[in-house]
Image (cartoon, coloured by chain):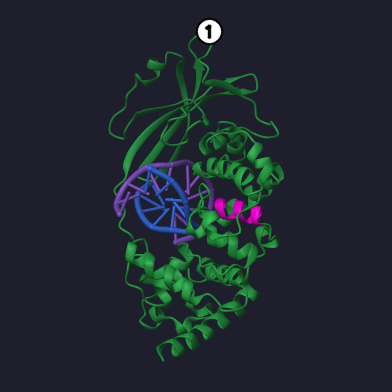
Chain colours: A green, B purple, C blue
Amino acid sequence: MATRAESGAHAVLRKALLAWYRDARRDLPWRRTRDPYGIWISETMLQQTRVETVLAYWPRFLARFPDVESLARASEEDVLAAWSGLGYYRRARALRVAAGALVEQHGGRFPRDLQGALGLAGVGRYTAGAVLSIAHDDRLPVVDGNVARVFSRLFALEDLPQSPGGQRRLWSLAEELLPPGGSPGEWNQALMELGALVCTPREPTCGQCPVARLCLARAQGRAASLPRPKPRPTTLDVRLEVLWVRRGGATLVERRPDDASRLAGLFELPTRETGTRSGLFPEAWSVAGLFLPGEELLRVRHAITRHRIEAVVRAARLATGRGLPGRFAWHRPGAPEGAALTGMAKKVLARGGAA
DNA sequence: TAGACGTGGAC
DNA sequence: TGTCCAAGTCT
């Protein structure tokens, strides 16, 4: 009996949400294709990344690497260059590795089955379900941050979404709610779209929600306070000094070590950690023995997970006429393919070094 | 399994 | 200005 009542409620929910989605869905470029490759790239770019940002990268990346084969053949540096500024660069490396596996083991095609997809580098349960449901309408659930939030409110879930129990409940709900017929891809996207446009993290617009009358959190007046926020770790302050060294039309960049914990192998403006907010280490550059710091140009603040980073960009000049170590290079903007620059380097170069 | 991984935008 | 966070995955 419970099953019967439940599926009735589910049917009402599906109908209302799908009707809303047909009308409210954004016309995003990756929604115009059913090509698993393009969808895979979009889903990977969208991980922890805003739609507005991906809008600029996705068409460019597909133009540069139009299919699995071109991506598999590309050098890591070329792929990173196309990814430059997007962040989470492990995604780009994984894409290339996975493309190689697709060519070697899957006939150059994205796998048709969940297990095959999950075997690919950088493809987890969300991405596998998203690509297969959207490209082929396979009956696979997805749970991303949007779906987690929508379900947490709709069903007044108390668990932290990231907890093991919370995850288990979310995925089993997502599975249960999948439409028996119709289009699972459409349904999954409708759920995510609701989270992105209406059931937002802060101040959800319940007045516009097509399923507000079915929402438990709404009925309890708790829509805005669910899901419970995850406790944040305290952040560490880091101070960086960044050198802006020019010669002719080129700017000096330095390649980060391949074994760096972050931004490995990417080019950045020469950067040293010079201390914290409370103390500076002025000898940092004399250790390098190459530069004379000059005037201050600008400050850049950003955060990487637990680090709150404050960077001071200075116009500087070389202190030696000797050749530079191999990790240094002169970067000339305007190369068609671009370079594998970090986001901050890209930003500073785009501004011409000035604030 | 928490914690790491980049970036830009909203408030 | 500081904080939170956006279509996750990996270790």
Circle 1 sits on which residue? A321
Q: Which residue is drawn at 31% across and 33% down?
A: A276
Other residues around mark 1 within 10 Å, as few (<14) / some (14–19) / many (≥20): few
Residue A275 horizontal/vertical position (percent): 32, 30
Residue A74 in view: yes
Amino acid on which the number 1 mark rests in the picture: Gly
Return the residue found at the far bottom: A1
The rendered magenta stretch, by its main secondary structure, is classed as helix
The number of callouts visible is 1
Q: Which of these two is toward me, A51 or A351?
A: A51
Q: Which of these two is toward me, A229 or A250?
A: A229
Q: Which of these two is toward me, A332 or A36?
A: A36
Residue A204 in view: no
Q: Which quadrant of the structure image shows residue A227?
A: bottom left
Side of A275 where A171 appears, left or right: right
Q: Residue at x 54, y 54 (%)?
A: A116
Residue A41 shown in magenta: yes
Residue A100 shown in magenta: no
Q: Name the quadrant of the N terminus of chain A.
A: bottom left
Q: Give the range drawn in magenta.
A: A36-46
Residue A341 horizontal/vertical position (percent): 56, 34
Establish if A332 lies above or below A322.
Answer: below
Side of A77 where A67 appears, left or right: right
Residue A308 horizontal/vertical position (percent): 37, 42
Q: Which residue is drawn at 47% across and 36% down?
A: A263
Label 1 is found on which chain of the structure? A
Residue A84 horizontal/vertical position (percent): 57, 39
Establish if A179 lies above or below A232.
Answer: below
SS under mark 1: loop
Q: Which of these two is toward me, A316 or A200?
A: A200
Side of A320 where A35 appears, left or right: right
